[in-house]
Image (cartoon, helix red, strand yellow):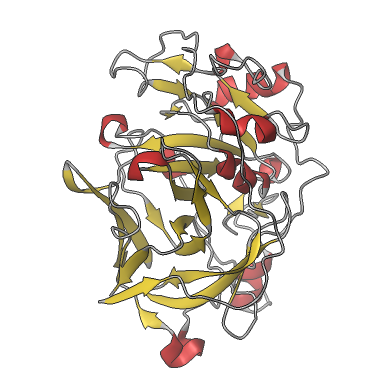
C-alpha cells in the first residue's frame, strides 16, 4: 500500500482564497413541504459501413440526433445538448442514507465540511425525469464555485452566513428552500415549492426534490434553461472511446490502484473505491459508523460506480470555532492524482476564474485525457493523506 500526501510545488498562487466573514449562525428556516410518495445508459454499437470501425464508433451516434455529453463523453439525446445541468447539495452521513438518484449523477464531488464530515455535490445533465433527488441539505460556498464550472443551476436548502456573497451574486442561479433565520438577505432563488419532505425519515434528512419541481422553479425564477453566456464549453479533455487512456504510456510513473482508500482524508465517511477489472469501473464504498458498505442509490438499489476518480489536494482554512471551512477553489500550484483502469498518475490542477473549468495536467505539463464515463472528484485538504494499492 502506498500513502500519498500533498506535494509541495514551487510557484505563486495567482488567485485569492474564497473566504467569507461575519456571523456564525447556521440556523435555517424549515421549508414548506408537501407529502409526496416515494433510468439506463445508451449502449454504443458499431455500424457496418465502408469506414473503419474506429471512425464509425467515434463519429456516428447509436441513434440519429444523439450528441456527446460534455460531462461524460457518453452519447446523449440531442435534446439535452444545450440543457443546463443541475448541481444538488447532498449530505453524507448514516442518517441520510440511502440517497436517491445519486447514481444518475454524471459528476460527483466530495469535500470536507465542519465536524470532519464530508458533503456531496451531484451534477446531473439529464435530470428532468428524476422523481426523487436527495436528500438535500445546505450550501457551503466552495461548492458553488465548482457548480459554476458546469454552468449548473445550484440546488440547496439554506446555508451559513458565509455563503451570502456568492449566493446573492447576480451570476449565481440557485434554487433554495430556506433562508437564514438570522439574515433574510439570502432570498435569492427561494422557491418553497421546489422541495418536499417525506415521513420515512426525521428532519433534516427528509428533504427532496424532483426533476419536475426543479424545472418549474427554473421557470418561476426566470433562469435560462439552456447554457448561459458564462458557459466555457469543453471541461475535460476526453480520450477516444476506441483508444481509452490506460495510463500505460506513463511507464513506471503510473502506480497500481485497484483500491483507493480516502479514510485518511475523510475520517468520518471513510470513502474508498475498489476496481473491478471485468467492467473497468471503480465501485464506491463508505466505511462509516455502521461499517463498510457499498454506496447504494436508493432509487435503483445499485452501487455507485465511476470510470474516473480524481483526488484534488486543495488549500483550506478553518473559519471559526464551529469548524466551518474555506477552500481555495482558484489556484494553479496544487497537485493531485488521476485514477482510471486500475492505475493512477500524479497530476497538477488549475482553475483561473469562477466559470473556468478545473484542468488537470500530467508531470510533463500535458492536459490529461479523461476516459468516457462518470467521474468522482475528491477534494482533499492540504496535509491529509490517502492510500492506494
Q: Residue furthest right?
A: 229
| Residue sticking out furthest to the bottom | 251
> Does any portion of residue 369 appear in the rendered image?
yes
Residue 376 placement (x, y as % from top left): 46, 55
Q: Is residue 330 above or below residue 277?
A: above
> Toward the viewer: 268 or 281?
268
For residue 362, above or below residue 187: below
Q: Is residue 278 visible?
A: no
As displayed, is residue 216 above or below residue 358? above
Give residue 72's quadrant in the image. Answer: bottom right
Instruction: Name the residue nearer the viewer: 266 or 296.
Output: 266
Q: Is residue 266 left or right of residue 151?
A: left
Tell me: 363 left or right of 112. right
Residue 278: image location, x then y, percent: 31, 69
The correct choice, above or below, for 191 with respect to 353 in the image is above
Task: Specify the quadrant of the image occupied by residue 330.
Answer: bottom right
Q: Is residue 114 left or right of residue 42?
A: left
Residue located farthest toward the left when viewing the structure as drawn: 291
Q: Name the quadrant of the N terminus.
A: bottom left
Amino acid at each position: 500500500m502506498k500513502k500519498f500526501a500533498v506535494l509541495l510545488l514551487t510557484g505563486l498562487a495567482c488567485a485569492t482564497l474564497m473566504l467569507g466573514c461575519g456571523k456564525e449562525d447556521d440556523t435555517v428556516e424549515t421549508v414548506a413541504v408537501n407529502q409526496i410518495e416515494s433510468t439506463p445508459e445508451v449502449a454504443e454499437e458499431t455500424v457496418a459501413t465502408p469506414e473503419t470501425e474506429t471512425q464509425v464508433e467515434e463519429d456516428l451516434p447509436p441513434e440519429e440526433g444523439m450528441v456527446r455529453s460534455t460531462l461524460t463523453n457518453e452519447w446523449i439525446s440531442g435534446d439535452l445538448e444545450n440543457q443546463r445541468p443541475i448541481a444538488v447539495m447532498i449530505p453524507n452521513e448514516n442518517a441520510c442514507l440511502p440517497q436517491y438518484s445519486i447514481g444518475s449523477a454524471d459528476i460527483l464531488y466530495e469535500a470536507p465540511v465542519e465536524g470532519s464530515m464530508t458533503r456531496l455535490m451531484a451534477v446531473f445533465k439529464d435530470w428532468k425525469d428524476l422523481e426523487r433527488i436527495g436528500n438535500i441539505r445546505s450550501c457551503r460556498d466552495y461548492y458553488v464555485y465548482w457548480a459554476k464550472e458546469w454552468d449548473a443551476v445550484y440546488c440547496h436548502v439554506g446555508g451559513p452566513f458565509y455563503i451570502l456573497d456568492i449566493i446573492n451574486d447576480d451570476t449565481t442561479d440557485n434554487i433554495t428552500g430556506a433562508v437564514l433565520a438570522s439574515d433574510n438577505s439570502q432570498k435569492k432563488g427561494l422557491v418553497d415549492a421546489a422541495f418536499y419532505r417525506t415521513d420515512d425519515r426525521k428532519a433534516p434528512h427528509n428533504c427532496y426534490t424532483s426533476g419536475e419541481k426543479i424545472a418549474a422553479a427554473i421557470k418561476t425564477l426566470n433562469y435560462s434553461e439552456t447554457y448561459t453566456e458564462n458557459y466555457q464549453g469543453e471541461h475535460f479533455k476526453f480520450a477516444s472511446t476506441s483508444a481509452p487512456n490506460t495510463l500505460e504510456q506513463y511507464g513506471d510513473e503510473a502506480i497500481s490502484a485497484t483500491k483507493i482508500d480516502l479514510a485518511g482524508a475523510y475520517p468520518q465517511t471513510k470513502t474508498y473505491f475498489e476496481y473491478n477489472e471485468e467492467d473497468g469501473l471503480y465501485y464506491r464504498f463508505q466505511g462509516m459508523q455502521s461499517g463498510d458498505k457499498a454506496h447504494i442509490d436508493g432509487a435503483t438499489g445499485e452501487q455507485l460506480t465511476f470510470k474516473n476518480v480524481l483526488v484534488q489536494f486543495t488549500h483550506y482554512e478553518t473559519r471559526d470555532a464551529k469548524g466551518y471551512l474555506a477552500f481555495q477553489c482558484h489556484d494553479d500550484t496544487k497537485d493531485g492524482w488521476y485514477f482510471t483502469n486500475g492505475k493512477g498518475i500524479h497530476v497538477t490542477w488549475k482553475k483561473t476564474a469562477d466559470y473556468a473549468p478545473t484542468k488537470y495536467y500530467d508531470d510533463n505539463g500535458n492536459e490529461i485525457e479523461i476516459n468516457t464515463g462518470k467521474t468522482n472528484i475528491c477534494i482533499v485538504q492540504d496535509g491529509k493523506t490517502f492510500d492506494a494499492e
